[in-house]
Structure formats: C-alpha cells, structure tokens
Amino acid sequence: MPALLSHSQPHIVSIHHAASAASAEIYLYGATLSSWKTKGKERLFVSTKAILDESKAIRGGIPVVFPVFGTQEQFNLPQHGFARISKWEWLGIITETDEEISVQFGLGEAKLTDALRLAWPNSFRLTYTVTLTADMLKTVLSVKNEGSNAFEFNTLLHTYLSVPLVIVPTPLPFRFDRNLQDVSRIHISGLTGHTFVDKVAANARHVEDRELVTIQGEVDRVYVDVQTPEIRVDDGVGGGYVVRKTGVRDTVVWNIGAEKARTMADMGDNDWPHYICVEVGSVGELVLLGRGETWTGGQTITAL
C-alpha cells in the first residue's frame, strides 16, 4: 500500500514510494513527520527520549509550529503554539503516481480545547501536504482564515535533519572501529550576507559573514528575510541535503548543545551531536491574513 493508517498503529500514517523503497511516517498527533528514509538511510532525527504518548510535542522529526514561534505576550499559548500538540485529521491520498505520492492532513479550531480556542479565538483551517519521491520530501502548510476578522500568525517547519553515522577506523596495532555522529562535520551554505538574530547572545543582531556555517556547540539563530533560493547542508562525508523554501521568509539554525541537552527531559544527554535543525518559516514578523484569505508556504528537501 502506498499510504496506510493501520489498525495496529492507528495514530501513524505510513507512506511508501514503491519504485525506490523510500518511506515516511507521520503521527496524527501534531502531524509530525517522525521518519523519512531514502536509499536505506534515515534522514530525520528523533530524540532517544522523545515522548510519544501525546502528552508532549514530539522531540524530533518535523514538528509544525503555529500560530506562534516561541512564546508571545499577547497570546496565552504553549511554546510554539498548538499545531504540534493537536490531533490532526487524516484527509487521505491526493496524488499517487510512479514519481510521487502525496497525502494530506487537516486541523481546524473544532479540534482545539476550549482553553486554546479562548487563547486564540480565530476561525481557521490548516491543510498540511506531505509529498514523497525517491530522494525528496516536500512539506507544505496552507492556512485559511475562515472567520470574519483578520488575524496574525507565525509558522515554522521545525526540521531535525539527521547527521549520518560514520565508521572511523583506528590505526594498527590498536585497531577498532568507532561509530560516530558528529554535528561539527556539518557545513551550511546559502546564508552568507543575511542578518540573523542570535538567541544565544541575548538576541543580538549580526550579518553572517561566513561562506560555510559550522556548529561547534549550542546555536540558535533566526536568519531573517533569506532570499537565497536554496540552503545546502553538507554532511562532511560526501552527502547531505538541499533545502528549498517557498512562501516563507526566514530560516532558523538550531542545535541545543551539550550543556542544555542535559537539562531537557525529552533529549538524551548524547543526542545533540546527531542532528542539525534547519527550519524554514515566517517568524521574524507576524503574517497578516485577511478574512477569507489563504497563505501557503513550505519546503522541499532533497537528500544527496
């Protein structure tokens, strides 16, 4: 079956691209992509301590951030909003060809708790489309204002890209092989010349002057109004990812680092070197959506 909501796992939609054996899994809780496999490799990171009982947002994969990024004083909402902690509706397969398979999920205010509707009293409809090909994953979010008044929002696709496992041989006579996953090998290009807000340094604003952005510890940067058509993530061993965004302005680069990883209940102490978050969205400024209007934005990730 190309897409399946099984009786044994009624909370997960599994997608398969028959021609290439590529696959993906999406939880109905948060519409969170938790797995994307191409060429026999897992491309998304999920924490070893991720909580999967629907009591907390899933730590890893691609959580959907909406309608706030972080927290905002004017809205009494959970961090990063309610989309990633709400139960979405499975809308089914919309495209099935030899080249690709696309599925959709939906969320409206009727699915929210009374407390969430009170905190964000807007009529809306979210439609999330996931498309899988042999080596590409495309995720697109549409936001429709179904109410009588305009509203503002932020949104982000909080993508955790997996850092590949590398077998490192040790020279003789003490020969043993070590399996390493190390985010410091990662090089990110396509951000040169763009202004970023450094959330690790009290929201200081700087202009990125490096051709290749590297990760040496905790990093939390919001690159605003990124006009570069694509961002390349080089994994240091001949592979990586190309991220192309559509309809969104900003790009976040994030890794929790060793020290803070130890303070997070849903992040393993040794998980932090195993991923890099390259997140596309519109978070630098609020998006204004008028009555009856629809906004659409997303990303296409190609595995190299």
Image: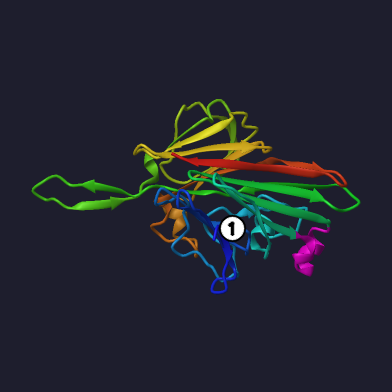
Asked whether residue 109 is drawn in magenta, I would say yes
Q: Nearer the viewer, residue 90 or 270?
A: 90
> Which amino acid, mark 1?
Thr
**Image color mode:** rainbow
- In the rendered image, residue 135, in percent from the top left (x then y), is placed at 48, 43
Image vertical order of residue 221 relative to residue 87, above or below: above
Asked whether, in this view, residue 44 is left or right of residue 82, the answer is: left
Asked whether residue 278 is drawn in magenta, I would say no
Asked whether, in this view, residue 137 is left or right of residue 287, the answer is: left
> Residue, x 79% and y 58% (percent of image)?
120
Image vertical order of residue 207 relative to residue 40, above or below: above
- In the rendered image, residue 114, in percent from the top left (x then y), is placed at 79, 69
| Residue density around tag 1, few if under 14, some if 14–19, many if 20 or more, within 10 Å | many
**The residue stretch that appears in magenta:** 108-121
**Residue at mark 1:** 32
Q: Nearer the viewer, residue 169 or 253?
A: 169
- In the rendered image, residue 212, in percent from the top left (x then y), is placed at 45, 30
Quadrant that contains the C terminus:
top left
